[in-house]
Amino acid sequence: MRCPDCSKGRMEACNEEYRYAECGLENVYLCGIRWSRCDSCGYEEAAIPRLGQLHRVIAWRLVTKPGLLNGKEIVFLRKQLGLKQYQFARLLGINQPELSRWETGERTRRTKPHDTLIRLAYALCVRDEFTSRLHQKLHQILVPMVACQVGKKVDPSPMEIDPSHSLEEEIESTLLEFGPVIQAEIEGGLKKRSA
């Protein structure tokens, strides 16, 4: 088959992992998909099934990864939410130029609370197979706090919050705790369906 890009080379089937640069991230590699590369110009073409599900998996991995998000990861999460930069900045309570500096990597002085807020904004705005249990846990943490602030009595199910941790640390630990558990359950479910 001729290359659709240069029309000179031939498209050769490849067996190695496919670097999925189209998502905007540099470190996403896909296994077990069919793809080919032009032997002349290097153009690559891949058949990627269930693209929406793949993007949700990538987003969940970003939300639950240890360490700060980089600029490209913030852009990916924002685009998954379908928000323009000014909309996401407003959601985070910052101005658009500040968010732009985070996304381009121009400003690396983003603090851990900002990073947690970005992850939380994504997790709370999305309802999917990855976030449903997280929503329940966050509801247990946040509802009593909000109720206390507005003077209402709430009898939530029992929960334990370590008083030596801030709310930000509690939410971050919840994200990190639930990430691998939910991921393992989903991967197990996917394996059962494909069997």
Image (cartoon, rainbow, N blue to C red):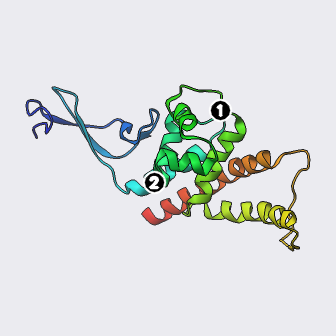
Neighbour tally class for label 1: few under 14, some 14-19, many 20 plus, Cα within 10 Å: some
Q: Quadrant of residue 150?
A: bottom right
Please name the residue that numbered disc 2 is placed on.
82
Quadrant for the C terminus in the image? bottom left
The answer, for residue 195, to whether it is visible in the render is no
Q: Say if 180 sits above or below 136 in the image.
A: above
Q: Residue 186, percent across and down?
A: 55, 59
Q: Residue 78, percent across and down?
A: 50, 47
Q: Say if 141 sits above or below 169 in the image.
A: below
**Which mark is first along the chain, 2 or 1?**
2
Q: Is 4 displayed left or right of 64 in the figure?
A: left
Q: Residue at x 71, y 37 (%)?
A: 112
Q: Residue 161, percent across and down?
A: 87, 55
Label 1: state its secondary structure: loop
In-front residue for pair 179/104: 104
Q: In the rendering, which numbered label is found on residue 110?
A: 1
Q: Amino acid at mark 2?
A: Gly
Q: In the rendering, which numbered label is found on residue 100?
A: none
Q: Quadrant of residue 7?
A: top left
